[in-house]
Structures are given as structure tokens and as C-alpha cells.
Amino acid sequence: MTNDSNRLRIAIQKSGRLSRDSEKLLSQLGIRFVLRDNRLIAHAENLPIDILRVRDDDIPALVMDGIVDLGIVGQNVLEECELERQADSLPASYRELQALGFGKCRLSLAVPEDESFASATELNGKIIATSYPRLLGRYLAGFNTSFRNCQLNGSVEVAPRAGLADAICDLVSTGATLEANGLKEVEVIYRSQATLIARERPFEPAKQQLIDTLMTRLKGVLSARE
Ligand code: ATP
Ligand code: ZN
């Protein structure tokens, strides 16, 4: 079943760091909806729009597979998914419509604080714990450096102390979590924010018109924020 619904489907994170800002933005675009706790889908009351609430990790593939029309997701998750799907020869295209200015964070390398660090090349052959092995691999490849992947999708920052890894590559906003785990941030490898993406396949005219209206409103919302 593909997405041939007449209603515009927008995927947002159900509960997490992007949820509140995503919901607020959709409201600011003039979409009226009520979110009920356990519901996957919220039907807008005033426009032919359905809001799909899912794990953030599921959003890129839903857009790349054309199951939903639009999605709001962190660029970090988006690009990691894109690289993974390219490697697996799965559909990986999408259109990035607009970076949204919230959900800002950085993906950084960190090492135990008592260790010296001069350059990423020193990590060659080391074990690095991360949830973003492809973004990390792409970055280190630029230094002709390779690493051994310790894939963790949570508790990344405890890996060095637990003896599982030599270093980590994780999302940072204040650095407090790193410090609490005896780590120091040594290199930012990727800067991220939330972004609005659309499926690659062209939209039927009515949907495209609705998207155009939303985009005009979005530009207004973003410029009013500056
Ligand atoms: P889900 O249950 O939806 O999978 P999650 O636990 O994977 O949620 P969150 O921690 O809510 O995800 O983070 C979602 C996104 O928020 C991140 O991928 C990133 O783009 C952004 N973000 C902003 N600041 C931070 C931060 N300090 N740490 C982690 N993510 C951040
Ligand atoms: Zn997630």
C-alpha cells in the first residue's frame, strides 16, 4: 500500500526532544489538531492533514519510502539513515525543504579526560562506541582513518569506563553528561538541527498547493523568530 491518500501525512517524533517544538510549529502553521496519548495518528480539524507520531528513527525511512509526505527529524538521524540505506541499496532520496532552527546539537568525539588527543588520526583502529557509525565513518575516512564499531543505541557515554570502547562519538548539547562520565569532547564531527523533509516523488496538485501554503507560512514563522 502506498501513500495515495488525499490527506497530507506529516510524521513527527511522538515523545522526545523534538516533540514539543514540532507540535508547536505545526500549530503555528495554522494546523488545528488534538493529540491523544496513545494515538498514532491525529487528524487535523481544519485541513486535509494527518499527523503521524512515531519514533524519530522511523521518520527518514517513512519519507524515503513515500509512506508519509513530510517529516520533521534531526539532520543527524536523517543523514545516518540515508547513508545506511544507500549502503543497503534501499530508496534513500528525499527533499530537504527547510531547516527549522530547533533541536540543535552536535555529534562529537570524546575520549577519557586523562588521555591526550591531538588529531582524529590517532583513533585509527580504535574501538569507538556510537549510534552513528556511518556519519563517524564518513568523517574519519576524510582523515584516512578507520575505527572498530561498538554500536550502542543508548548509554554510549558509559562504554569507555565499562571497558567496551576507547572513545565515543555521541550527541552533545551542554557537555554535562560527558563530564559526569569522565570524558572530554575533543572534536565536533557534525552539527545538527531539526529539518522539514518531503518525499521525493512529486505531489498531486492539491497536495502540492497545500504544501506551498504551509511553506509560505513557515517562512513567515521563521523570519518572525529572528
Ligand atoms: P525516540 O524515542 O523517538 O527514538 P530518542 O531517544 O532517539 O527518541 P531524543 O533523545 O528525543 O531521541 O532526541 C531526538 C533528536 O533531538 C536527536 O536525534 C537530535 O537530533 C536532537 N537533539 C537535540 N539536542 C540533543 C541532545 N542534547 N542530545 C540528544 N539529542 C539531541
Ligand atoms: Zn530515536
Image: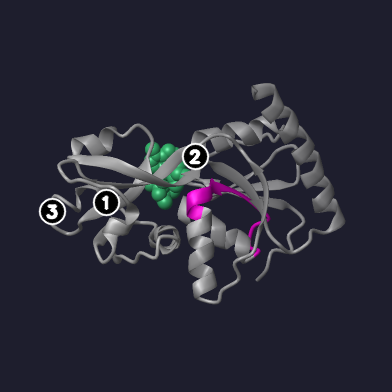
Please state the quadrant of the image where ligand 1 appears: top left
Residue beneath label 1, please? 156
Residue 16, by quadrant, is top left
CA–CA distance between discs 3 and 1?
10 Å
- 146 to 53, vertically: above or below: below
Mark sitting on residue 36: none
Single out the mark in the foreground, 1 or 2.
1
* Magenta stretch, residue numbers: 66-77
Would residue 134 appear left or right of 186 to someone viewing this image?
right
Can residue 17 be seen here? no
Give me the residue at 35% from left, 64% from top.
145
Q: Is residue 71 magenta?
A: yes
Tell whether circle 2 marks a residue whose Cβ is less than 8 angstroms from ligand 1: yes
Residue in front for this viewpoint, 165 or 5: 165
Q: Badge 3 local density, few (<14 within 10 Å), some, or many (20+)?
A: few
CA–CA distance between discs 3 and 2?
30 Å
Q: Amino acid at mark 3?
A: Ala
